[in-house]
Structure formats: C-alpha cells, structure tokens
Amino acid sequence: MRFLAVLGLLFLAGCATPHARRTDVLFWNQPQREAAFRTMETHYASNVVHHGKAHPLPVGAPLLPRFADGATLDSYMAAHHVAGVMVVQDGRIRLERYGHGAGPTTRWTSFSVAKSFTSTLVGAALRDGAIRSLDDKVTRYIPELVAGAYRDVTIRQLLEMTSGVRWNEDYVDPHSDVAMMYEGMRQPGVPLLVTYMSRLPREFPPGERWVYKTGETDLVGILVTRATGKSLAGYLSEKIWAPYGMAADALWLKDEVDGTEAGGSGVSATLADYARLGQFVLDGGIAAGKPVLADGWIADATRTHSGIGAPSRGYGYQWWTYDDGSYEGIGIFGQLLHIDPRRHLVIVQLAAWPVATSEAEAKARADFVRAVNRAIGEL
C-alpha cells in the first residue's frame, strides 16, 4: 500500500509539472526552432481543429518567382530558413516548395498569422449573433476587466489595437509584456492572460493611437470563446476547417490548466491548409455553400483602420493592409499569409528565421512577394 501511495504521489507530481512557458519560443536557438516549429504539440498543450473533406487545390501552370537581384527560389529559401512556400492563383497551385525536411503533411506553427484566424472567427460570431456589435464594451464578455484600463475599450478597438493600454511587444526582452503575459498568480476560473491584462495601465485614450499588442488578440480569442461557449479550435472547426474542407487537422495551443487558447498565436497547420484559409477569405467566406461571416466582414476587416507610421501600409482587424488592396497575416520568425484580391492570389510562407523580427528579413520576405508578382506580370 505504501508503494502504491508513493507511486500515486509521483504520478500526481508528474501531472502537476507544467509544460515549458509558451513564451519560451522567443528564446530558442536555431536548431530548437527548426525542430520545434513542426512539433509544437509535443512542447505545449493544444486542442485539435478537425478537418473535413478536402477542398481541391488543383495544379495550375508552374510559376517561378523572378527576384530583382538575381536570386533563385532555392537560394532565397536556404538563406532565410524557409520551410515551405505556396502560391495559389485562381484556386490553382502554381508553386509548392519545401525546405528543412518539411513536406505536405508537416504542420508548422503560424505565430501571429493566427491573429487573422481569430479575427475571422469574430466575423463568424457576429453572423451567429453570439457577439452583438463591435461597439460593445469588452467587459460585456470579459467582466474581470471592468476595474482596469480596459473598462471603456470596445471590441472594435481591440481588433484595431487602439485600446490605449500600455504594452511592450519587445521579443528579445524577457521582461517585456509579450514575454510575461502568461506569468503570475492564477485566480480560479480566470484565464491567466486576463489576470495579467487587467493590471496594465492606460497610456492613451481608447481609439487614439495604434500599438501592436499580442495580448489583446488573446483577449479577443477569450471574448469569442465566452460569447460562443466554444473553444477557438472547436469554433474554427465548426465554421471553417471542416465545412470549407481543410485536408488535415490543425492544432491550436492552449493553457494546460485553464484550457484557454492563445488567440494571438499558436495555430499549427499544413502549408496547403494555410493556403485554403486564404482562399476561403479570398472567395468571400463561403463554406459548404453558405456564408460564414457577417455581411461585409471581409471588406471591413481587411481595409485600413489604423495608421502604423509606415508608407502605403496600415492595420485592419488583425490584418496588415496595403494601399494596393492586398492584405496579410504576418507571424514572427518568417510566417506569411498574403492575399491579393486583384490578382486572385494567395501566397503562404512558413519559416524559422534566426530572429523574431528584423528589417532585413522582412524586406527579403516582401521581395519574395514582389518576385511572385513579377512572374505573374504587373497589373
């Protein structure tokens, strides 16, 4: 009996041992990144996003990007640790290439590309009536924030990242908000992220200034979960992943204690299914022959709502916007979901850059998009 009791204690101790912090990914070395980005579920708890009958992506005319500096696709992918690129135009795959041992069945993490997933689920919740209005106060759905700086912030301002709440998104500072947002004392029934965000001070009036905040997209995800009564993974599967026809299950990382998924990051999917998500948006948000999103949602979500201090660029509802009408979901370490309605074009890149962000890497990624457009032919 004593042996069984000791064994039971050891079992409980093992169950109580937490996974690595979700923000540890910011500080992995290059070999760790390249290995773990394809197996995030072995490092962190996650929920499954169940797929349906595969939406076809037939093969179209081959396309080879034309880089202005004479680089080749192979040299670009090798230099920037790219694990996969896909170009879909008019619903047909014109380019599909893999690196770093990845392949068609590899699930790769998205980081902040997931923000655009979460935004899209807001559009679904609006159509369902689970969210009444974007002008609702956030505290209608997350009342734990009522005593803090978020008490007068609307859902729209969260989506635009114009809450005015102070935030530090420095990916190399282990004490920044983005590195610390899952730390602290737990309160029963309250997601750890909500506890952290409820203590943040106000810096600007709501709606006055844009500041990029991953923690706020996590709040949007919690809001969707509260409004719909469903996990983000479950709601994504119900509304898009299964009825539109993603070919493989995806994963969405969650807090292993309270089960809260990270609305601002944490989706892992195959290269082709990221492209299918882009095609779903490009085609107007129709799945199984039915509209999934609130009327006008895509046009509103993908237009510029906030200036970001950069020429020809802006921010919509968790999409990066461009003056030419294209828009992007962008994730640290090189992830990209680029959608260009004028060209009927979707471009996906999965990567493991050696740094979370840098001007040089971002320029190279933008040059890749331009190389694709050059091969297609400028409009």
Image: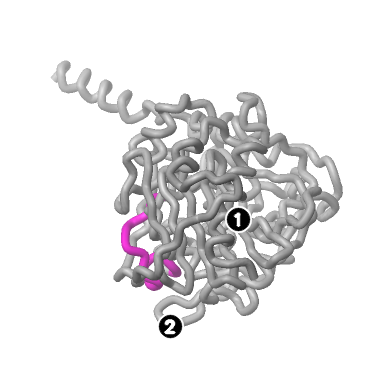
Q: Would you say residue 244 sits in the magenta stretch?
A: yes
Say which mark, if any, is on residue 93: none
Instruction: Give the Cα distance between marks 2 and 1.
Output: 33 Å
Badge 2: residue crowd in 10 Å (few <14, some 14–19, many ≥20): few
Foreground residue among 129 and 285: 285
**In this image, 129 relative to 18: left or right?**
right
In this view, the mark in front (2 or 1): 1
For disc 2, the marked residue is 289
Q: How is the image coloured?
A: one colour
Q: Which residues are magenta?
A: 239-251
The count of marks equals 2
For disc 1, the marked residue is 370
Give residue 227's position: percent from left, percent from top. 56, 63
Residue 130 seen in this snapshot: no
**In this image, 133 relative to 248: left or right?**
right
Q: Would you say residue 70 sits in the magenta stretch?
A: no
**In this image, 324 relative to 249: left or right?**
right
Picture quarter with the C terminus: bottom right
Three-letter code for the amino acid on which mark 1 is drawn? Arg
Q: Secondary structure at mark 1?
A: helix
Foreground residue among 289 and 311: 311
Sequence-first tag of 2 and 1: 2
Picture quarter with the N terminus: top left
